[in-house]
Amino acid sequence: MTEFVRACALAEVPEQGTFGVELNGVPLVIVRSEGEVYALAEFCTHEEVSLVDGEVYDHTLECWLHGSCFDLRSGKPTGPPASRPLATYQVRVDDGDVYVAL
Amino acid sequence: MSSLSRAVETAGPVSKLHAKESFDPDDFAVPTGREEEWRFTPLRRLRGLHSDAGFDGKVEVEVSAEREITVVLAQHGDPRLGTALVPSDRVSARAFASFSEATILTIPDGIAASRPAVVSVRGHDADRAAAGHVLVEAGANSSAVVVLDYSGTATYADNVEFVVGEGASLKVVSFQEWDSDAVHLSHQHAVVGKDASFSHTAVSLGGSVVRMVPSVRYSGSGGNAELRGVYFADAGQHLEHRLLVDHGQPDCRSRVTYKGALQGNDAHMVWIGDVIIRVEATGTDSYESNRNLVLTDGTRVDSVPNLEILTGEVVRAGHASTSGRLEDQHLFYLMARGIPVDAARRLVIRGFFAELIAEIQPRELADRIMTAIEAELENLGKTP
């Protein structure tokens, strides 16, 4: 039922980093960390800050501006000031391309 | 000795609020969202109003007023325009540079308008941005009520100027009853003359993003400004009111009272209340307050009052801000008298707004606003 949409080439996302895309009007941040690929809502739930410029470490995406931390796997906030989770999306990597289920 | 005292005067504190004004959009950089004045606004929902959207759209502007009020359409470059208002952000400057026709309402000296004048702005197309301009000149010792009635859908940036002459009384209601996909950024500025009184009520109920900047400056002593606001933010709605009262004349008074309620996921309300009391503004009497009722989880309120006082010789200068849930005790009082919880909640919320809505003229408009709020409250009953 969920339809996977091509987001980007896997090569566009740094090994341990982020890549911003907009799919069907939804701004997303694609994250690669420790061999896994994740897709989350692009904007921090604290303020309108793009997490494409965030830091990736230890299953965490950290907002560069105020330091809100989110778990890459669940989108749940793991460090303040954010208190609400980021939306997360299912990801499939196929033949070097990243597909996201919206 | 004299040179020393002058040195003290000029080295005095300089206002940091509202530092920049210009008619040239290029004087304002495209906001990135990191600026103090833009950090709460969802820029990506503004459809380019803040950056480079071309103003090739149109809204319908209609004026209904009695004959004693002169209504004219003025072209860009009319010398009366821009005498009161100088844009203080990029959107306002872009709107000023781009509107094609301005509406000017003039209330002659000494005339008491017999009926409220209504400027209705109706949008039909949100895909193309539109810009507008309205000037209201209230002559000396005149009195009038002016309603700005925004409806339909649009991507709209406008500037509204009020020039309140000596001893005049001007009451304005700006009613944002947009459809749910409208984006509206409005700068509404008043210059209040000697012993004049100005009241402005912003009622923001509709729209996807509404960002209003009501501001007041005084051009003589004894002026009185009452700025009120009523708003109701639903899921996904961003309602922002940024006020500035600039006291630069002695013995003037200002009151700011904004009240609103929020319900639903990502309902976002921003209130910035800036008051400057300059060195010359001795005898100033100023107070501002913002009250927010948070009705459900998932909403967000940013309420920031700022007060800059550059003279100690004031009557009063204060501010207050509260954001909270309905009081259990109020609900308990009503429920203990057999009123069901939903009805009790609605009653308390109605009471919360009644104080401000009671002040609104004309009565029919107040009734319309109350009905619109009642409709919002109907939704509340449905989402537990």
Image (cartoon, coloured by chain):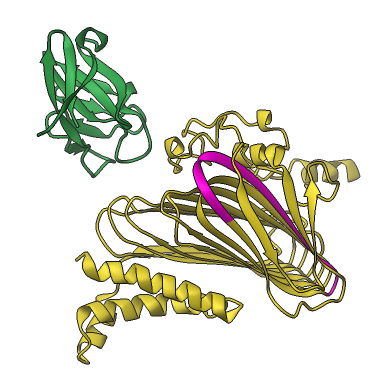
**Residue A67: in magenta span:** no
Q: Nearer the viewer, residue B357 or B17?
A: B357
The residue that appears at 35% across and 58% down in the rendered structure is B234
Classify residue B361 by image quadrant: bottom right
**Left or right relative to B70: residue A33:** left
Which range of residues does the magenta coloring cover?
B122-141
**Left or right relative to B223: residue B335:** left
Q: Nearer the viewer, residue B22 or B15?
A: B22
Q: Residue extending furthest right?
A: B2
Shown colour of chain A = green
Output the letter for the chain in yellow: B
Q: Quadrant of the N terminus of chain B?
A: top right
Q: Residue extending furthest bottom?
A: B337
| Picture coordinates of residue B16, whole percent (x, y) | 63, 43
| Picture coordinates of residue B284, whole percent (x, y) | 70, 66
What kind of secondary structure does the magenta stretch mostly adopt? strand
**Left or right relative to B134: residue B323:** left
